Amino acid sequence: MEQAREYNQDSSRQKYTESQNHIQNFLCIFKKGNETHSALRRINALIRKTQLADTEQHSIQQINEEIEEVSRLSQIKIGTRISNSDTTEKKREKIEELKGYQKAIYRARKLENNMVHKQRIEKNIQKRFSNFACNTKKMIDSILTRHKTPVIINKIAHENYNMTKPKTIKYEIKEHFKQLTKYNPKDEKVWEGWKARYEPRDEIDKVWYEGVEDEIRMEELKVIIEEVPKGKAIGPSEVSNKMIKRLGNKAIKQLLKIMNACIKLQIVSNSWKKGKCTR
């Protein structure tokens, strides 16, 4: 018992550590990606400003400060600086240098985007694998894109007042459903009037039902699965005909065992006895 407790604690600690490491890595990449994106936007604007730059309209010092900021954000050492004494040809050469840095920053930004996208795919694969191993209900909901929309009640209207406090609303709903599903004893007087309706009828011939309790054969089950329509509404078990049609041979054998066990033991799952109405 003590070993099992220690194992569970170690397992929980490991999962927590992995989760924290993943969050830290994601935040690090996210922060770096934002800085690279900002650097790319700034150098795009900087090149346009430098191409149109006039010493009377734009401060050369402001342009150089912007170059330093781009260098800091992208973590790329940019040695290009604009000067008042630059000739038209020299200025054109420096703009081409800035365009080279622009391409390098663009490639870095694209690489970071690919890394984030790859990490997101790996995270979803790991999540799907974890659900397949430990939470099959969540896995099936994900495969079938089935999501439950929560019911939100913001107000309960009484005769003389309205209830709006969330905690009070939850308590009122809880008490309401307690009373709604309380024990309802059978009325024996009413049963006496219906009892005769449930007695065996003499005109029913037992021969009609001979063989009903015989075991189902594999050939019969496969024919039935082949013939059932796909578009029918699912029951409370939420297993559709489409899912059953895609079962492999091993799964069909297990299904056959379950059905024959129901016939032999005369026990049927409660969820199979219920229906489900949808709007």
Image: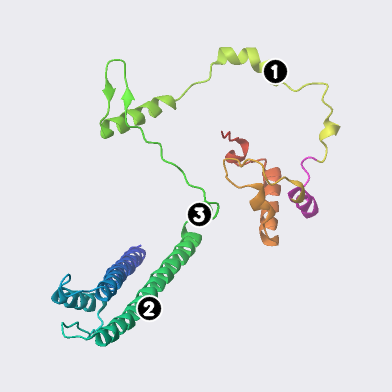
| Magenta run includes residue 189 | no
Disc nearer the start of the sequence (1/2): 2
| Magenta run includes residue 214 | yes
Residue at figure coordinates x 29%, y 81% from the top left: 95
Whether residue 182 is visible: no
Look at the image and name its color scheme. rainbow
Q: CA distance from mark 3 to mark 2?
A: 35 Å
Which quadrant of the structure image shows residue 117? bottom left
Name the secondary structure under disc 3: helix
In the image, the segment drawn in magenta is 212-225
The picture places residue 97, in percent across and down from the top left corner, at 29, 85
Residue at figure coordinates x 53%, y 53% from the top left: 140
Which of the image's four quarters has the C terminus? top right
Q: Which amino acid is tagged 3?
A: Ser
Disc nearer the start of the sequence (3/1): 3
Which quadrant of the structure image shows residue 150? top left
Q: Which mark is residue 197?
A: 1
Please tell me how crowded label 1 is: few (under 14), some (14-19), or many (20+) other residues with Cα within 10 Å.
few
Between 53 and 25, the residue placed more toward the observer is: 53
Q: Which amino acid is tagged 1?
A: Arg
Name the secondary structure under disc 1: helix
Name the secondary structure under disc 2: helix
Q: Which residue is mark 2?
A: 107
Disc nearer the start of the sequence (3/2): 2
Q: Which residue is mark 3?
A: 142
